[in-house]
Image: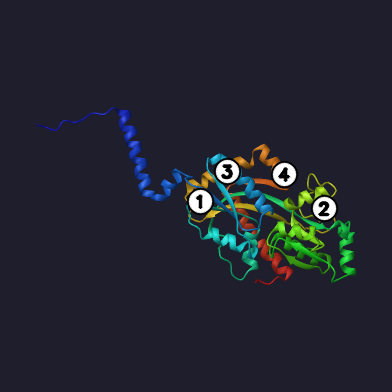
Amino acid sequence: MPERKTRYPRRDIIRTGGRFIAAAAATALGPRFAKAANYPERPIRIIVPFAPAGPTDIMARILARHLGETLGGTVVVENRPGAGGNIGIGIAAHAEADGYTLLVTSSAYVVNPSLYAKIPYDPSKDFAAIAELGTSPNVILVDPKLGVNSVADLIARAKANPNELNYASPGIGTTPHLSGELFKIRCGINITHVPFSGAGPAIQAILTGTTQIAFAALPPAHPQIESGALKALAVTGEHRWFDLPDVPTMVELGYKDFVSDTFQGFLAPANTPAPVIDLLATKSIDILKRADVADQLRNDGFEVIANGPDGMRKRIADEVPKWRDIITKAGIKPV
């Protein structure tokens, strides 16, 4: 007796076939696909390679809060400062590429390859770009009690007293440090650099009188400028900052091409599943483009960029050689 064939409605064949194709694709792609499909299943850790209260930490915490709400999970920020950002960046570089350890970093990411003889990551190979988040100008700060009211006053004071003044920065090789060294070269002065483990400690140093000057990214300094606790002499952006109309740019003061900013970038270990990268990029950009978030970041001293992976990759490719050139001209030897 011939075997009886069972007939299925066409729509059931299509549905069954679709499930078969999806299952086959998941099998072919392996466990990474399954992890991406259910992401996130546990808390996500964002490593910040600097101390709390700096610009990168501020950006990371704003992003983490909204990203957790958007993804329906928990996103925590873990500060791992030290070695100019190398410690935290290295930890992230060698973490499992499953989307549960991410990195929000600053321009140190593109500076450190030229500043250190050996670093624990390759900027072009060890990470997958997620998004270029934002940028902020650096600012030259003085203690109001110093009696210095302009860049010209500061230069005159430094020339009259060559060994008197020192300046705080968030760490060796950060863009504020390099701005300070460029300032010394362009102005023909000598002030002593005192590096700290992040922008927060650097701001505290000038507030407590440990240093008389600080070069810092604008976000952590902004509240202190507004309150009058610190005086801003100049910003290093292309334009004056929108709510600091009385603070000139270095270019306005006659220092051609003296433009230096600090960016914040969002990265994941290389080989993180592409669907996870795509999801994080889409959600991050959507968050940054929200009016309430953009206003908050602007008021905190950030210019929102909100570019996806291509923008972040271009930033890295452009800035590694840019900062190498500045480091060479400043005579800073790799450590």
Residue 198 pos. (x, y %) = 69, 59
Q: Earlier in the sequence, mark 4 or mark 2?
A: 2
Label disc, if present, on residue 67 of the rendered structure:
3
Q: Nearer the viewer, mark 2 or mark 1?
A: 2
Helix, strand or loop at label 2? It is loop
Q: Earlier in the sequence, mark 4 or mark 3?
A: 3
* Amino acid bearing label 4: Arg
Q: Nearer the viewer, mark 4 or mark 2?
A: 2
Label disc, if present, on residue 229 of the rendered structure:
2
Left/right placement of residue 93 relative to residue 22 reads: right
163 over 168 or under it: above or below:
below
Q: For the N terminus, which image quadrant? A: top left
* Amino acid bearing label 1: Tyr
Q: How many residues crowd mark 3 within 10 Å: few (<14), some (14–19), many (20+)?
A: many
Helix, strand or loop at label 4? It is helix
Residue 275 pos. (x, y %) = 48, 46
* Amino acid bearing label 3: Leu
Say which residue label 4 marks.
Answer: 298
Label disc, if present, on residue 25 of the rendered structure:
none
Q: Give how far apart the Cα atoms at labels 1 and 3 are.
A: 13 Å
Helix, strand or loop at label 1? It is loop
